[in-house]
Image: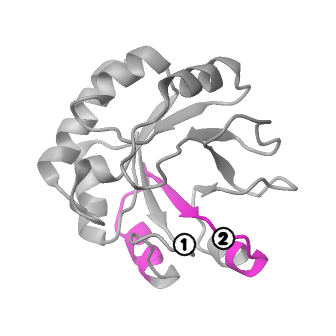
Amino acid sequence: MKICGITSPEDAALAEAAGADAIGVVVFSDSIRSVTPEVAWEIFSSVGPFITRVCVSTTESTDDLETILDMNPDAVQLSIPLEERLPVRTICMVDTPGPLHAHADAIVVDASRGTGRLFDADFAERVARESPVPVILAGGLTPENVAGAIRRIKPYGVDVATGVEIAPGKKDENLVRAFVQQARGALL
């Protein structure tokens, strides 16, 4: 499971200590959780080698993408279709019916895009069933609903931002721990 929208080394350490598999750092985006590449590097440097570091972006700029790749993330999560495969694992966001991304290593079903809006269960179920690559579920997940969502959709993993925050970009330790515990129990 990924704790996304990490904006500080402290929140990255909190996610890691809670047992998250990955952290997401938003760059080159109009999101309130977007940080500079320098801050992203500081966040990525603050966690150990066993947590996956994901750069999340809505950019369409080749220069921005080059800067992202220079940060040496373990994966890149984008909202645009790619014309070619990237040199790192690539996760593409899907929020409406249509063809799946040809060069994606995984897909995040997420119409929320960090707003906390609940995912469309029927759509997510269909994507999870038909996708040739792993599907990650996002959108409106909380410690209270994540286990049920996992049992219904059967995703490869889950991704949360607003459901574990006390304010945009500021994670709550108790919510992060509860989310990880509930998700881990349902994913096993």
At which x and y percent is residue 171? 23, 59
Instruction: Judge by depth and name the residue closer to the eye, 116 or 6.
Output: 116
Task: Check residue 118 for magenta coloring.
Answer: no
Instruction: Judge by depth and name the residue closer to the eye, 15 or 174.
Output: 174
Image point 28% across, 65% down: which residue? 168
Where disc 2 sits, the SS reads loop
Q: Quadrant of residue 79?
A: bottom right
At which x and y percent is residue 179? 25, 37
Kindly identify which numbered label has been placed on residue 59: 2
Disc with the residue nearer the chain's start (2 vs 1): 1
Tell me if residue 12 comes above or below residue 108 in the rendering: below
The three-letter amino acid code for the residue at tag 2 is Thr
The three-letter amino acid code for the residue at tag 1 is Ser
Is residue 142 rendered to the left or right of residue 64? left
Kindly identify which numbered label has been placed on residue 29: 1
- Neighbour class for label 1 at 10 Å: few (<14), some, many (≥20)? some
Q: Quadrant of residue 78?
A: bottom right
Q: In which quadrant of the rendered image does the C terminus lie?
A: top left
Tally of numbered discs = 2
Task: Check residue 61 for magenta coloring.
Answer: yes
Image point 46% across, 35% down: which residue? 119
Highlighted range, magenta: 39-65
Tell me if residue 110 comes above or below residue 23 in the rendering: above
- The CA distance from mark 2 to mark 1 is 6 Å
Marks 2 and 1 close (CB-CB < 8 Å): yes
Tell me if residue 26 comes above or below residue 2 in the rendering: below
